[in-house]
Amino acid sequence: MSDKKTLYCVIMAGGVGTRFWPESRQSKPKQFLDICDTGKSFIRMTFERFAHLVPKENFLVVTNARYKSLVLEHIPELTEQQVLCEPIGRNTAPCICYASYHLRNIDPEATMIVTPADHLILNEAEFHTIVGDTLDFVESNNALMTIGITPSRPETGYGYIQKSDNATISRVKCFTEKPNLELAQLFVQSGEFFWNSGIFVWKVKDIIAAVAEHLPEHHALFDAIADKLGTEAEAEAIAQVFSECRAISIDYGVMEKADNVYVRCGDFGWSDVGTWGSLYQLSRKDKYANVKPSEGCYTYNTRSSIVSLPKGKVAVINGLRDYIVVDTDDVLLICPRAEEQNIKKYIDEVKYNNGDKHI
């Protein structure tokens, strides 16, 4: 496994988490919430998940500038210099470029683990074994590693990775983004396709070489300001780069094009907990299949629903089946579970009529 001194963890924490509205807000998005009621926010759990592998001084968090103080509040072990601030969101490729070119200045021999800030992993022992395998592999190979998850259902909201063989670590044959239900069913039946976790492991020099080859315009922009990263000129230089660089995911921009992409698959209780529906699937239910607070929520003739309330609030709910009910200080959402894909539309309409104060 890579030397701890040259091993770094990059946490991507810039998302707004609109699918968890109205709990998740622009001022405090999903990664800073304890949606799963574990006593810890997602970003705190993510930091602790890797803290035994990576020295605390080797963490970087890439986030929107407005969330810098929140990051430091949730991970007080970090210094301000370890929080890289994006002026605007540009998807994962520019985010990963920023961290990679920054790290190259610190340690050209660095190995990076890249992880989203807001995922849930239940079997951390198995996950650590898998991460160890990926680190061993990239240490001796020019490889861009990703971690795949054995699918438990034909999920249409995830990307899929197709393996080329049954080896523990396999070359990736192809990526497929969010297939329709029929295709997802075929994927699961085949046994060759795995969910894309969005967790990556690679050497800094290998990802930068891949960006130079497959995203040359991004490479040109970040390489041109490399000497300003880590200096007082960084913020201005990054603002200029992000205003010019195209928004694109690392999957589309690099992973789908490169020929040195490998996957290590496993089953470690992973979920991106991306929606109220996925939280419902993960949560403990009462005898009527409802997910609700242990106190203050009285349900009658109500089945298969999820209810979220502010602490101290009392709610009486009668006659709902398969619903989402989310109450906050200033917003109440009542929506059929089957229609939660409309939450973005609801947000747009509320924003159009009421401005940003409820978003």
Image (cartoon, rainbow, N blue to C red):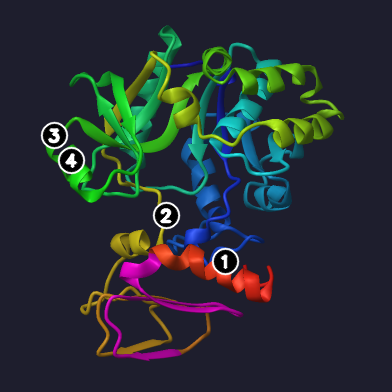
Q: Secondary structure at mark 2?
A: loop
Question: Depth-wise, is mark 1 or mark 4 nearer the camera?
Answer: 1
Which amino acid, by three-letter code, is at mark 3? Ser
Q: Label 3, on which residue? A: 190
Q: Label 2, on which residue? A: 274
Q: Find the distance from the CA under tag 1 to the CA under tag 4.
A: 35 Å
The residue at the point 25 percent across, 90 percent down is 301
Q: Find the distance from the CA under tag 1 to the CA under tag 2.
A: 19 Å
Q: Find the distance from the CA under tag 2 to the CA under tag 4.
A: 20 Å
Q: Identify the image quadrant of the N terminus.
A: top left
Circle 4 Cα neighbour tier, 10 Å, few/some/many (<14 / 14–19 / ≥20): some
Asked if residue 316 is among those painted magenta in the image, a careful observer would answer yes
Q: Is residue 192 left or right of residue 310?
A: left
Q: Identify the image quadrant of the C terminus.
A: bottom right
Nearest to the observer: residue 9 or residue 154: 154
Q: Find the distance from the CA under tag 3 to the CA under tag 2.
A: 25 Å
Which amino acid, by three-letter code, is at mark 1? Asp
Which amino acid, by three-letter code, is at mark 2? Gly
Q: Is residue 114 left or right of residue 341?
A: right
Q: Is residue 34 visible?
A: no
Q: Find the distance from the CA under tag 3 to the CA under tag 1.
A: 39 Å
Determine whether label 4 and label 3 are within 8 Å by CB: yes
Q: Label 4, on which residue? A: 188
Image position, residue 70 (x, y; %)? 68, 53
The residue at the point 21 percent across, 78 percent down is 287
Q: Which residues are magenta?
A: 315-340
Which amino acid, by three-letter code, is at mark 4? Val
Determine whether label 1 and label 4 are within 8 Å by CB: no
Q: Find the distance from the CA under tag 4 to the CA under tag 3.
A: 6 Å
Q: Is residue 253 left or right of residue 179?
A: right
Image position, residue 155 (x, y; %)? 27, 49
Picture disc at residue 348 = 1
